[in-house]
Image: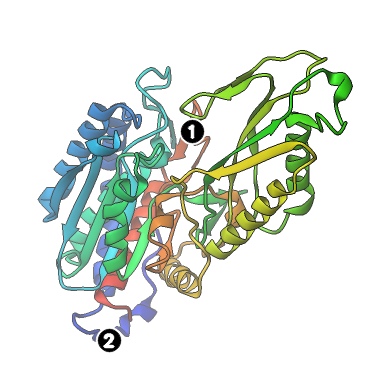
Amino acid sequence: MRPILTALMGLVIASPVMAQTPEAERTIMATVVAEHDRHIGLLERLVNVNSGTLNLEGVTAVSEMVRAELEPLGFNVRWVDMGATGRAGHLIAAHDGGGRNILLIGHLDTVFEADSPFQRFVRDGSQATGPGIGDDKGGVVVIIAAMRAMQAAGTLDGSSITIVLTGDEERPGAPLEVARGYLIEAGRVADFALEFEGLAIEDGEEFGTIARRSSSSWTLTTGGRTGHSSGVFGETLGYGAIYEMARILDTFRRELPEPNLTYNVGVIAGGTPAEIDAAGFRVQASGKTNIVAETAIARGDLRTLTPEQDARVRERMAGIVDDHLPKTTAELAFAPDGYPPMAPTPGNTALLERLNAVNRDLGLPEMAPYDPAKRGAADSGFVAADVDTLGGMGMAGSGAHAVGETVDLDSLVRQSQRAAVLIGRLSLGEP
């Protein structure tokens, strides 16, 4: 790693504490490099403990491993039980050094439950695979490595940092206002928020995440008069449930498109009868070619970039649904447990600019904003309306949510260095 540029020598006093010094930042960089093998070992241990969202014991066990890392650094660590939502809980750690409060966001759970065949960490040189290795156990290790480097440099002492690691990011518990209440409250009192999902990288170029789209789901149910198919389209039977469903979905396809908007249909069934299970994942139907369909059901998702876009699109979808074919009915219902967007804001852009100042001083590549249409939703969406937020501070990798999920172990070094220097500058004051 190149040394920090000598231009940083012109540091000034920041209120209420002195800004981070170039010497401290050199110590941060050296400490991260020196502890690289230690943190790979920690990553391996975390990955080898299954913490699928519904494996409550596993999620709790991983939280205890993280607690053991943070408490010796002076963090006040507590476990918030989330049994009321059907999930394990959240780990919340606080370090009050008197500086501006920096919220660090990650999660303990993975999509790989205890019955998954994908269970172990495997290393191949600078690459490693394992369940949740990038999403988000790699991000958790970046946080720990950054905190240890800050302690070695003496910058942790004067920094105020709150870490919230949720235990149900992949499958949030319900009600959502309870499941995310602690995170939302932490965002309201933070000065800046950094989210440690995986680093956005494309063709070898690294990007900053200043925006993420929302993720919500909807269920569309259509109804029609059933009877012999010889009467379809007529005044008595009308068009039936399946034609009404087809009309609505095709109108969505033709009339809704706009930048940064998608609305997938994931499952559909129609007939006499048709039904959906309580979880909303499985539909079944039966019918005959000479019977007009009585019921049709479809479920899909909606992803938007801003709250304003979300409200506008939902209103337009409702209008399309209400324009029924003769003798049919339709009802559109949105699930209450969606992820809000992390909208692009001037504050988020400014935060990326501050990260790029760190990149320049550390001799690391600068980052352009990543296309939000290429990123999934994350817990950062729950705080982004209240605090300037930057995402994608975790490790670089590929194949998230799939067997063979991989990370670049070398990215653990530069991401930890970036995070430690940025956190210190934000909390202590910048030159």
SS of the residue under disc 2: loop
Q: Residue at x 20, y 66 (%)?
A: 160
Q: How is the rendered protein coloured?
A: rainbow
Residue at mark 2:
12
- Residue found at x 66% / y 40%: 330
Q: Select label 2 or label 1 by which is in front.
A: 1
Where in the figure is residue 134, as x and y percent of width and height? 42, 40
User: 388 above or below 321?
Assistant: below
- Does dot 1 land on a helix, a strand or a loop? loop
Q: Residue at x 50, y 75 (%)?
A: 346
Mark 2, other Cα within 10 Å: few <14 / some 14–19 / many ≥20:
some
- Residue found 26% across the figure and 47% down from its top: 35
Q: Is residue 32 visible?
A: no
Instruction: Give amino acid for label 1.
Output: His
> Which image quarter holds the C terminus?
bottom left
Taking 232 as reference, is 19 above or below it? below
* Residue 5 position (above or below residue 163): below
Q: Nearer the viewer, residue 406 or 234?
A: 234
Q: Residue furthest front?
A: 236
Residue 401, label in figure: 1
Tell which circle, 2 or 1, labels the residue nearer the N-terminal end. 2
